[in-house]
Image: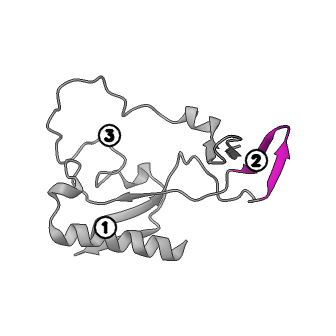
Amino acid sequence: MPEFRQNMVSKEWVIIATERAKRPDNFVQKKEGKKQLPPHNGDCPFCPGNESMTPPSLFSIEKNGVWSLRVVPNKFAALQSHLTTERRREGRFLKANGFGIAEVIVETPLHNRSIATMEIEEVKNTVVAYRERYNAL
């Protein structure tokens, strides 16, 4: 179970989430020269046509029946929404359950795009999605 622990010296909170070691490492790559990414990758859970590889969308922006942005729950989140926020002292540590919500915003259906290469409308949609999900949570 994930938890927050307070650093005794700095008083900052850190997340301890041992379950994250179970997440897949499909995206780990050796450091080589930057390769040009294709616009679509058949193995990528965030590419169009692979929606069954992710949980159902919580929010999406569609154009002509095709999504241009979607938000899905993070399958490998460091925090869990069903836990309590109660703090407790265990030995010298102040701890709290790892309560939180994590979502993934798929900003574009094109695998090889970043915010720096998006059209202004796509950037606007990304900001709208952050606002909408923040307000919903």
Quarter holding residue 137:
bottom right
How many marks overall? 3
Query: Disc 3 and disc 1: Cα gap in Å?
Result: 24 Å
Say above or below: 81 vs 122. Answer: above
The residue identified by callout 3 is 43
Of pointers 2 and 3, the one earlier in the residue sequence: 3
Of pointers 2 and 1, the one earlier in the residue sequence: 2
Say whether residue 16 is left or right of residue 136: right
Mark 3 surroundings within 10 Å by alpha-carbon count, few (fewer than 14), some (14 through 19), many (20 or more) = few
The residue identified by callout 2 is 95
Q: Nearer the viewer, residue 50 or 58?
A: 58
Residue at 73% of width from left, 56% of height from top? 83
Q: Mark 3 is on which residue type?
A: Asp
Look at the numbered disc 1 and give the secondary structure of its residue.
Answer: helix
Say above or below: 111 vs 19. Answer: below
Tell me where residue 124 appears, x and y as whole percent.
25, 72
Can see residue 94?
yes
Q: Mark 1 is on which residue type?
A: Thr
SS assignment for the magenta stretch, majority: strand
Query: Disc 2 and disc 3: Cα gap in Å?
Result: 39 Å
Query: Disc 2 and disc 1: Cα gap in Å?
Result: 34 Å
Residue at 73% of width from left, 51% of height from top? 97
The residue identified by callout 1 is 126
Residue stretch rendered in magenta on the structure: 86-97
Q: Mark 2 is on which residue type?
A: Lys
Can see residue 65?
no
